[in-house]
Image (tube, helix red, strand yellow):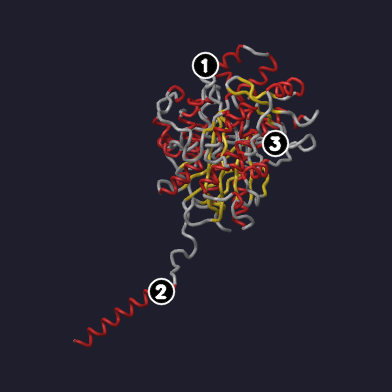
Amino acid sequence: MRKVAIKEYAYCLNHTPELAYHYGNTPFWERKAKGESEFLLSLSKSMRPFEEAVSYAPNQAYIGGIDPEDLEAQPVPWYQNPMRGASRWGQFGEIMPEDEFLALMDISDVFDIIWLEETFSGKVKEKLQSHPLINPDILQRLEKGHPIDAIEREIRENEALPLYYDGITVGCCRKSHEFDECLSSYVLLENIACKAGGVLALLHLLKRAGMKPEEVDFIIECSEEAAGDMNQRGGGNFAKSVGEIAGCINASGCDVRGFCAGPAYALINAAGQVASGIRKNVVVLAGGAVPKLYMNARDHVKKNIPALEDVLGSFAVLLTPEDGVSPVIRLDAIGKHSVGAGASPQAITEALVYEPLKRIGLGIADVDKYAAELQNPEITLPAGAGNVPEANFKMIAALAVMKKELERADMADFIKERGMPGFAPTQGHIPSGVPFIGHACEKIKKGTMKRSMIIGKGSLFLARLTNLSDGASFIIESPSPLAGEEKTVSKEAIKEIILEVLADLAGSLKGSAKE
């Protein structure tokens, strides 16, 4: 079985404080139950402007503006110490402002679900004309817009949800069925936002890879949303719908779901297709989840912390056959959490970390960096959820001590050297290992790191079907020279060698004759 290369990667954030304030699950249901409560009033005063989201250090780490390890050198709390000179554009992608993202949602809509007000649509079109990735074919999908009175009537009479920018109604999201809840305006808003985020990440990926959209063979989408109707709620297909907007006319695709472990499963699935020769260029991508916006805002507001959960994360990764240059995925060391593995942190860590390493004759210390559940601790600590990345790294270090691969006294150094600060938004599927893939590959290509393990874990009890835990892991490492690469010599080179030998031989014979 061939090894599989991670050819390229892209990471984007969409700054969406208005979507968060109105349609994040916590404020949405607060408003349903209590109206415009004191919490919502406080929350409205805690929303960050775009410039603060751009200068926020964890966001810069996500889009490749800084290395995750550089976060430790940034003064804390990060939200009180903005980075000077921070840019919307990072090595791996961008942070898109909300007006442009609303336009991208309209561009991604093919059923006339998103309506934008005509003046707003005209202004944002002018902005998108200068966007390096929004080409004329994509931009022409943006509607000219609707009169505000038509939008307000749709909201008032047909259960459309208003879309806001700077506190003003600039559009709406319409329902698509009279009584199907799966096609309600709220669910469709979630899905179109998720799709639009995936589109943006895919566009960045194609640019970074120098690849034409029609060269993509297959797309796997692995967000936490579910597309379908009342007869098949998770039928899909986000993957093909994203490919359609980006112009991937030769690609097929499907959706893979696994709660927070979804991206790990999707990447393993994609790697299997590439390794077997079924597909050549496979993209794994995901958009963000609107319900997770401002999920912990109640605790942030209580502690006078800005509402930090105001970005939708997205990513895209391109897998291809190994090329001898790009980092590779080890398909002989895939970690899995089986039904009978147990749900304790120790059991999960042993299944996902120790067992796959043992299978290929490696120890826990042979991995330079572990990446698992990389949630930003400034979001989770105030909410009482702890420092999730640190807890994972402590568990891996403790397992190394149990297996007698590490001295207890060296645990702190192990955690510092092989872990990293959390820097991902709390979007569930987004933090689980995948934000580090881009950074890991860059380090491997530079020769500063040899091997990393990406770990995705999922909480299956959320669906009320089982109390089992879930998870998958894989190893990324330096590529080996392709078979025969070091021994292959061209015919021209052989001829040159022969001529040099003959010339040397002729010279030796002339010398012998003179003597």
| Circle 1 SS class | loop
Amino acid found under the numbered disc labelled 3: Ala
Name the residue at 68% across, 13% down.
Answer: 34
- Nearest to N terminus: mark 1 or mark 3: 3
Amino acid found under the numbered disc labelled 2: Ile
Name the residue at 40% across, 74% down.
Answer: 494
| Circle 3 SS class | loop
Q: Are marks 1 and 3 in contact (CB under 8 Å)?
A: no
Q: Nearer the viewer, mark 1 or mark 2?
A: 2
Q: How far apart are labels 1 and 2 at the CA level?
A: 74 Å
**Outermost residue, left direction?**
515
Q: Residues within 10 Å of mark 3 (few under 14, many from 20)?
A: many
Q: Residues within 10 Å of mark 2 (few under 14, many from 20)?
A: few
Q: How far apart are labels 1 and 3 at the CA level?
A: 34 Å
Instruction: Judge from the rendering whether residue 355 lies leftward or rightward of residue 179; answer left or right.
Output: left
> From the viewer's perspective, is residue 506 above or below residue 50?
below
Q: Position of residue 287 (x, y in %)?
A: 61, 36
Q: Position of residue 25 (x, y in %)?
A: 65, 24
> From the viewer's perspective, is residue 449 above or below residue 430?
below
Q: Which residue is mark 3?
A: 226
Q: Which residue is mark 2?
A: 494
Amino acid found under the numbered disc labelled 1: Lys
Q: Position of residue 305 (x, y in %)?
A: 51, 19
Q: Which residue is mark 1?
A: 303
